[in-house]
Amino acid sequence: MSARAVALVGGVTTPFGVRPTTWAEMAQEIGAALFRAVPALRTEDVDSLFVGAAEPERFAFQSHVAPLVAEQMGLRPRRILQRTELACASGQSAIRSAYAAIAAGLSDVAVAVGIEKMNLPSMAEANTSMVCVMDRPWDGPGGATAPPFFAMVAQRHMREYGTTEEQLAAVSEKNHRFANANPHAQFHAKSFPRAKLRGLPLVAPPLRLGDCSSMTDGAAAVVLVADDRARIYTDRPAWIRGTGQYSDFHNLAHAGELSRWPGLTAAAGEAFRSAGVGPEQIDFAELHDCFSISEIVEYEALGFCAPGEGGRFVEDGRSDLGGDVVVNPRGGLLGCGHPLGATGIAQAVEVHDQFARRVPPARQVPDPEWALVHNLSGSANVHSVMIYQAGGAA
Amino acid sequence: MSASEKAHRASGTGTEAPDTGGEPAAKPTGERPPEKRPFLLDFFPLQGEEATRLARFYERLREGRLSTTRCRVDGDLHWPPRVACPRCHGEDLEWLDLPESGRIYAFSAVLGAAPLGMESDVPYAVGLIDLDGAPLRLFGRIEGRPWSALAIGDRVAVEPYEVGDGRVFYRFRALDA
């Protein structure tokens, strides 16, 4: 589909959580970690840098972050340096931009990095920043934040398909269990059985605390290279085989019926077509579970199950290890936390680490060949999908 | 003052004395012009003709009328109101009053984690409202009944209200069945 195949040859994340460190310090931290994780990578190899950052202006009072991050990471990009802002999907936007640049021959070795620092002394200020993701002058005065929007998605899905709170808890329980096997996850050390999840306080009914991803500090980075460079850095490349993106609304008035996300079906259709595979070939998927209900709607939109069957799909273990497709073995946004710009990059790091058999056995997918990553933004306004294939030649 | 208190103050309305790092603040000279009200961190838009080409929307709202724009060329009904039609990209638009009532399509409530300025509103209900007789589904606050007593399909009235500083906005009020 492209002039040159593109490989993801390595990646790393910082610990995710409430971090006693600044936005810029995390840029240094992820740079140091990246060069340790990809030993063959030299500073001068990196010709381009793409920085996924959702709201540094609001969370860190800092704009013009691309050159700042280059300096903090010790990089001197000589071809393309840019920030990609797409709210919660800023991370995959950075990867897709790097992919496009390499496929077009404008870059040979690119780093895509995502950074977000969301925990502020005043969390009301952080919540205010989250409203800015919405159509602020129109939906903002009503107090629109993500939880009530996704709560309405859950309400309509329950009404139309009989989805239950127990099924929402099944998503959260699974992803938190995987996060227990991910030392960098925000909730690595916390156990969330379904009974406990069902007893947590309501945040935006019907969603409870355990149905919502958290405000998280963290960074993640990956290295993407042209086909002929891949073997320099790894013998376990993850090849980008397809990608798609779709956006059909921003203002909440245009959110449609809520319980189905045709924009995701459109993005996935393009990704499947370009990769030449279908949902039945996918061994594991990193899906954007910003809320438990999101993952259920996504199973359906991606074709892992029929519309309306997402709740049953997770309840029957079909998205767990041993099921049809392992969903969110990293721990998801629910278990790992959701540092906006870093999330989409961290999802891709998991693809590389799964293919390289580098994750703890409790979350290792057996013999994975095909992986799908979905990163959405805002109130499910933009859906981005990428499909990776393990190993082999370009 | 702790670091977090300082940061919290810094995030406020800007009316406090500037933080001078522990040194006594400079005495006011009385010669500085009055500071303009900070616009950022305020969800309510500036509504006058000097600030927006949609000032008419707020004028009509002040008269109790929720309205929007419609394209005179292709009849496209917009929400929110616009200055250019997204379908034909023409700028020949007309104002149209919207229905004053509707029904709840979906709703939830914010029970915590409110933005600045809305902390004391918690808990507050929000919803998507299908306007009676218009192909529009509008988001907004739902007043008049606790969220736990609302149901999909409940009738609501459009309610323009004053923000308190001369500006206006709209919300919905639950009606008795």
Image (cartoon, grey):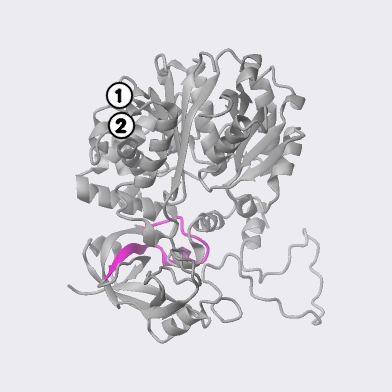
Residue at (40% x, 26% y) in the render: A276
Q: Residue A324 lies in magenta, yes or no?
A: no
Crowd tier of the residue under label 2, counting other residues whose Cα lies within 10 Å: few below 14, some 14–19, many 20 or above: many
Given residues A230 and A333, the one toward you in this image is: A230
Residue at (67% x, 27% y) in the render: A109
Q: Chain of mark 1?
A: A
Left of B53 or right of it: where is B23? Answer: right
Q: Secondary structure at mark 2?
A: loop
Q: Position of residue A330 (x, y in %)?
A: 46, 28
Please give the range of residues in magenta: B110-131
Evaluate whether label 1 is on the same chain as label 2: yes
Left of A107 or right of it: where is A339? Answer: left
| Location of residue A341 with respect to A74 vertically, above or below | below
Residue at (43% x, 34% y) in the render: A271
Identity, as a three-letter code, of the amino acid under mark 1? Asp
- The picture quadrant where one finds residue A232 is top right
Q: Which residue is mark 2?
A: A304
Left of B104 or right of it: where is A137? Answer: right
Q: Are marks 1 and 2 in contact (CB under 8 Å)?
A: yes
In the rendering, which numbered label is found on residue A300?
Answer: none
Residue at (57% x, 82% y) in the render: B49
Q: Which residue is mark 1?
A: A324
Q: Secondary structure at mark 1?
A: loop
Q: Position of residue A223 (x, y in %)?
A: 62, 27
Identity, as a three-letter code, of the amino acid under mark 2? Phe
Q: Position of residue A148 (x, y in %)?
A: 38, 55
